[in-house]
Image: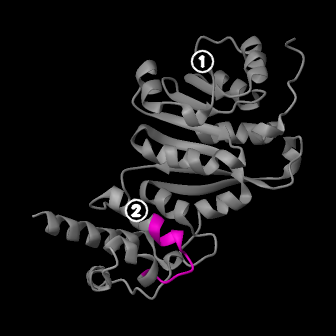
Amino acid sequence: MSAGLLPRPRKRFGQHFLADQNIAERIVALVQPLPGDLVLEIGPGRGVLTQRLVARGGRLVAVEIDRDLVAYLRQRLTSPDFRLIEGDILDLDLAQLLREEDRERLLVVGNLPYNITAPLLFGMLARADHIRSAVLMVQQEVARRLAARPGTKDYSLLTVLLSLRAQVHTRIQVAPGAFRPVPKVHSTVVEVQFEPARYPVQDERIFGQLVRTSFGQRRKMLRNSLLAICDGQREELETRAAAAGIDLSRRPETLSLEEFGRLSDAFAGARSEAEV
């Protein structure tokens, strides 16, 4: 492919390339890469962020699934501090990448297609200890869910699980006209700052199970949605909820992170008692 030809966007990859240069500058400013930092860019596309990140210094690794874009970027960017991986970001072994790059943590940046946003964030949560922060362009409705408060319609499973390990900040509102082709939705740039558990639960696995089960039937009261965790033993459920100070007539979207944490710890404590 000639370096002067722009690869066409592919619908199957949900591609909408950022074309607004001002927005690109603001995103890179949020990433704040420093010399010696490792930055992982998800879906570099035509390289509007990539070029700026390379110019800022530090080590940049980009993952792109579109082979035409990979060929285009390899012709345009030849910096020794830039590495381009052809593949699906959801298949990337982050631990392996860090070993190869001799780093312990990294920064993440990317314009995310809607269909991979949730699985990608869940994958990042699994590697939260290795990620300092992530600056992500997502659909506006997704951004609302990520930063939602208890008691609102946008408060969800992803909200709670992410809030255990990260703080989410809404940074930039982006109109459809900033992209080519122009999408039908508005977008938002969010900054996700990872940190040690904000509520130190006894068992993160139990916490995850509890939250997933609760939101699996979000219209039901906790008394009904959580019964399966206690193998149908309603008295056991009532006992654990009372220990955590949680009213089981509530619905999951009304519980704060701390309340989910207390309830999780009550179940974790019950399991520990049973194993003694």
Mark 2 and mark 1 residues within 8 Å of each other at the beta carbon: no
Which of discs 2 and 1 lies nearer the camera? The answer is 2
In terms of depth relative to the viewer, which is nearer, 257 or 167? 257
How crowded is the residue under tag 1: few (<14 C-alpha within 10 Å), some, or many (20+)? some
x and y percent of residue 29 in the render?
65, 39
Pointer 2: what residue? 209
Whether residue 91 is in magenta: the answer is no
Whether residue 220 is in magenta: the answer is yes
Q: Which residues are magenta?
A: 212-222
Q: Residue at x 61, y 18 (%)?
A: 82
Quarter that holds the C terminus: bottom left
* Image quadrant assignment for residue 209: bottom left
Q: Is residue 33 visible?
A: no
Q: Earlier in the sequence, mark 2 or mark 1?
A: 1
Question: Element under label 1?
Answer: strand
Question: Element under label 2?
Answer: helix
Q: Residue at x 85, y 24 (%)?
A: 7
* Image quadrant assignment for residue 74: top right
x and y percent of residue 229 in the render?
36, 71
Q: Amino acid at mark 2?
A: Gln
Q: Vertically, is 143 above or below 235?
A: above
Q: Amino acid at mark 1?
A: Arg
x and y percent of residue 152 in the render?
61, 76
Q: Residue furthest left?
A: 276
Q: Residue at x 38, y 78 (%)?
A: 227
Pointer 1: what residue? 83
Quarter that holds the N terminus: top right
Left or right of 119? Residue 272 is: left
Q: Is residue 98 visible?
A: yes
Left or right of 43? Residue 167 is: left
Q: Residue at x 71, y 31 (%)?
A: 49
